[in-house]
Image (cartoon, rainbow, N blue to C red):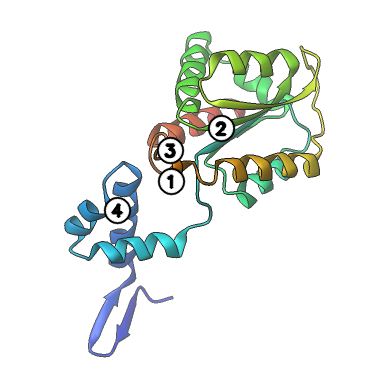
Amino acid sequence: MSEMIRIGSKVISRDKLYGAIDQLLLDRSRGATQAEVAHAAGVSRSFVSNLESLGEVRHGARIALVAFPVANGDELRVLVEEFSLDFALIFSQDERSRAESGNTGDMLNQLLDTLVELNNYSAVVVLASDWRVQTMKRLLDSDVIGIELGVSPLQSDVRVDIEHLREVLSGVVESTRDEQQQQQPPRGGGRMSERGQRVRKAWDQLRRH
């Protein structure tokens, strides 16, 4: 597919257009106002608003999901996309073991970074052992919705009831839908913070080690 497209007498660069849109959305996710990014891009504020509306998949508070150890991680990842969740960490027992076998100092830093990141979300759905669910509730300021997968310590994968999880996520999304309008903007800005991307990438590297 050509990167150039002619519209009447104009020749439009797809790369230039997509790059400008990516920068605009990135600036918005970092907290810039619509007016600020519109001024920087040389467009109207209404254009920015219409662009966001065109791409919107969910409205409301930021929601994260943490699940381990699970047997049907791929099915959970499909739900993450279905509900457009902002952040997700999903591990099988084998992936968790590989992640935990690394350098102790690196692991501690990664856990601390993850806790800091999760506190940027209004709601965190946690699927884990009973002890870990309760621990997450004590450590996080976010609203933690726990689904206990069994008694700690869990040493093998647990198959998650997908329909039950879908019901839980539906309820969480519905309950937080109007939070931005009624209270305050979602904590941390756009869909996923840069730190959130780094945290998820680091866990992906650890579990594949």
Q: Amino acid at mark 1?
A: Gln
Given residues 194 and 28, the one toward you in this image is 28
Earlier-in-chain disc, 4 versus 2:
4
Which amino acid does the dot numbered 2 rest on? Ala
> Which quadrant would the N terminus be assigned to in this image?
bottom left
Instruction: Tell me residue 204's x, y (percent).
Output: 56, 32
The residue wearing badge 4 is 23
Q: Report how far apart the C-alphas of labels 3 and 2 lie in the structure.
A: 15 Å
In the image: residue 25, left or right of residue 53:
left
- For the point 52% across and 15% down, the residue is 107
Image x and y of residue 180, in percent: 44, 43
Is residue 24 something that shows in the picture?
A: yes
Q: Which residue matches tag 2?
A: 123
CA distance separating discs 4 and 3: 28 Å
> Residue 174: which quarter of the image?
top right
Few, some or many residues within 10 Å of mark 1 (<14, 14–19, 20+): few
Kind of residue indicated by mark 4: Gln
* Cβ atoms at labels 4 and 2 below 8 Å apart: no
**As displayed, is residue 148 above or below residue 174?**
above
Residue 183 circle label: 3
Q: Circles 3 and 1: CB distance less than 8 Å?
A: yes
